[in-house]
Amino acid sequence: MTRSETLPAADFESAAATESTALRTVAALYVDPRGPYPSMPGVDCWDERRDARNYAGPHPVVAHPPCGPWSRLRFFCRHQARELAPLAVAQVRRWLGVLEHPMGSLLWREMALPLPGGLPDAFGGFTVEVDQVHWGHRAQKRTWLYIVGCKPSDIKLRNGGVATHVVTTSRRSDGTALPECTQLERRLTPPAFAEFLLDIARRCAPGGGE
């Protein structure tokens, strides 16, 4: 007996759609090979060696372009290519998916991306603000996600998580200070957050943001 014979038609269609989403390949662009993506199934990884600038589809993407040239400390950034982030925006718009950058990234102003809570842009793209501590990061790390190809209601947010570290030196109101994350921790994506971003990309489809 096949699975279609054991499920009502509506349930079978729902299950088939879920399976299709779960198995869909996603391209992870501008990633660190030491991060979680290379060991995740269904992920086509593009690190510096492979050069994500050459990605030409056809899969939806999760893009992590360098953020240094677009941050408050951009004047101290000497070794990251500024042009990669605008290219990543174009890749997300072309192939659908999600781009991740720190909250307040100047990329949003440069590319006229919608702010969190704002109306979608001409590509159907919108922005969601999240904190990576909810996905297992040891520090609060508020992040903006530019998403093209699905609706805000498709995004499955979560809460919880307690910061035990900080990204940069910070002192609490009681005068005590949390320890800093390592430089590598600041760079890498928590595995649960990577899964969250992959799930978003797998939900994206042409016209999905309309």
Image (tube, rainbow, N blue to C red):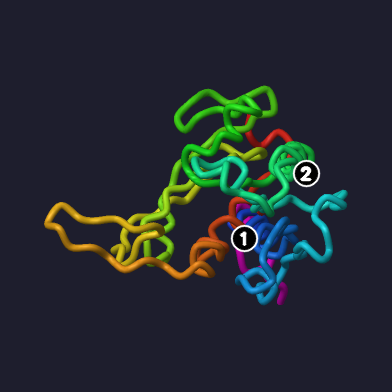
Examine the structure image and report whether residue 199 is included in the region drawn in magenta. Answer: no
What percent of the width, then of the height, locates residue 190? 50, 66
What percent of the width, then of the height, locates residue 194? 57, 62
Report the residue at 53% width, 23% height from top: 119
The Cα–Cα distance between marks 1 and 2, rounded to whole angstroms, is: 25 Å
Query: Viewer-proximal residue, 186 or 190?
Result: 186
What percent of the width, then of the height, locates residue 184? 53, 69
Query: Viewer-proximal residue, 4 or 156?
Result: 156
Secondary element at tag 2? helix
Q: Can residue 145 be seen from the camera position used here?
A: no
Q: Which mark is residue 123?
A: none
* Bounds of the magenta segment: 1-10
Side of 134 relative to 195 (left or right): left
Report the residue at 83% width, 64% height from top: 50
Residue 135: image quadrant is bottom left
Q: Which mark is residue 15?
A: 1
Q: In the picture, which quadrant includes the C terminus?
A: top right
* Amino acid type shown at disc 2: Trp
* Residue for badge 2: 95
Residue 89: image quadrant is top right
Examine the structure image and report whether residue 4 is included in the region drawn in magenta. Answer: yes
Residue 126: image quadrant is top right
Secondary element at tag 1? helix
Q: In the picture, which quadrant includes the N terminus?
A: bottom right
Query: Viewer-proximal residue, 189 or 82?
Result: 82
